[in-house]
């Protein structure tokens, strides 16, 4: 069974999408429509922008979404048996299985990006990757012990690879305690804020308003969502899970394991980069 997976923020690169634009009329139409929907030349920033331009959340998220959805549209005989996306990639996955239209998916992503950027500016916050530890519970317990600040597990990326998220002080405290507990590596990430943590609540509230105005359809195949790590086929459930996504952890490792248990034999990453392929090898290995 074929599983198609879609990347999130961090997989962007300079010149992304230019190759798609040059080779396909379908791609050119989709880029033109995207520029009209977001109200600026997103395609120009993708093709000619600097690394700094592409790092801005309000650019990164629609850019990665657009590259992923156009790439899927250009796959001949595209018939997924199941799909999943990492964080932002979940919206890309929803579009390719007809849960959301292309236009509504892009609007949602553009608004999500702005809401997240605004939430990041309220409280100084950050994220850190934790690599080489004994168990997820070890990280979860250290985060729970820090009650004076906010710090939580945010991304369960692969066995022995988890990302924590919270206030700058909370993440710093957790990093100190994790190192003291013998964790091999803890690396602060170059992000603008604490994604997938309670600090994203202002963004979640704004997104809920937009989601409530958006039409969701049952997908053509199961979508494994970050919040539940289970196969979802009911549009109402998919909508509710998406509402909870910004303040909940991304259960990527659990989702991939469930997809394998449900019969996935081939994983195809669609979009910029190949980060998810590397994680899937670690999860399935």
Image (tube, helix red, strand yellow):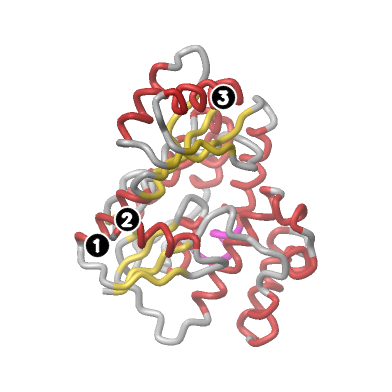
Q: Is residue 161 magenta?
A: no
Query: Which of pointers 2 and 3 lies earlier in the amino acid sequence?
Result: 3
Answer with left or right where residue 50 lies relative to residue 213. right
Q: Quadrant of residue 84?
A: bottom left
Disc 1, SS: helix
Answer with left or right where residue 70 lies relative to residue 280. right
Magenta stretch in the rendered image: 101-106
Disc 3, SS: helix
Q: Which residue is mark 1?
A: 260
Q: Say which residue appears at 55% left-offset and 38% top-offset.
A: 187
Q: Which residue is mark 3?
A: 172
Disc 2, SS: helix
Answer with left or right where residue 84 lies relative to residue 91. left
* Position of the N terminus by quadrant: bottom left
**Could you say where residue 35 lies in the image, as x and y percent from the top left?**
72, 66
Q: Say which residue appears at 26% left-offset and 71% top-offset.
A: 265
Of circles 2 and 1, the one toward us is: 2
Which residue is at the front of the view, 92 or 13? 13
């Amino acid at each position: 069974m074929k599983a198609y997976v879609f990347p999130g923020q961090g997989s962007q690169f300079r010149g992304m999408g230019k190759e798609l634009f040059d080779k396909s009329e379908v791609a050119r139409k989709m880029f033109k429509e995207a520029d009209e929907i977001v109200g600026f030349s997103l395609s120009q920033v993708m093709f000619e922008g600097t690394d700094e331009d592409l790092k801005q959340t309000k650019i990164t998220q629609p850019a990665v979404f657009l590259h992923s959805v156009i790439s899927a549209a250009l796959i001949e005989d595209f018939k997924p048996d199941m799909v999943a996306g990492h964080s932002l990639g979940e919206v890309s996955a929803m579009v390719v299985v007809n849960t959301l239209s292309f236009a509504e998916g892009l609007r949602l992503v553009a608004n999500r990006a702005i809401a997240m950027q605004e939430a990041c500016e309220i409280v100084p916050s950050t994220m850190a990757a934790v690599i080489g530890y004994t168990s997820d519970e070890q990280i979860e317990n250290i985060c729970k012990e820090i009650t004076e600040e906010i710090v939580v597990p945010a991304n369960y990326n692969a066995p022995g690879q988890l990302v924590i998220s919270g206030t700058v002080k909370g993440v710093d405290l957790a990093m100190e305690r994790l190192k003291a507990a013998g964790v091999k590596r803890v690396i602060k990430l170059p992000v603008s804020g604490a994604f997938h943590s309670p600090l994203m609540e202002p963004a979640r509230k704004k997104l809920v308003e937009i989601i409530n105005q958006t039409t969701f359809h049952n997908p053509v195949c199961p979508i494994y969502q970050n919040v539940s790590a289970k196969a979802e086929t009911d549009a109402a459930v998919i909508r509710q899970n998406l509402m909870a996504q910004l303040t909940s952890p991304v259960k990527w490792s659990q989702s991939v394991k469930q997809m394998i248990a449900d019969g996935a034999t081939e994983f195809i990453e669609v979009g910029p980069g190949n980060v998810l392929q590397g994680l899937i090898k670690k999860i399935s290995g």
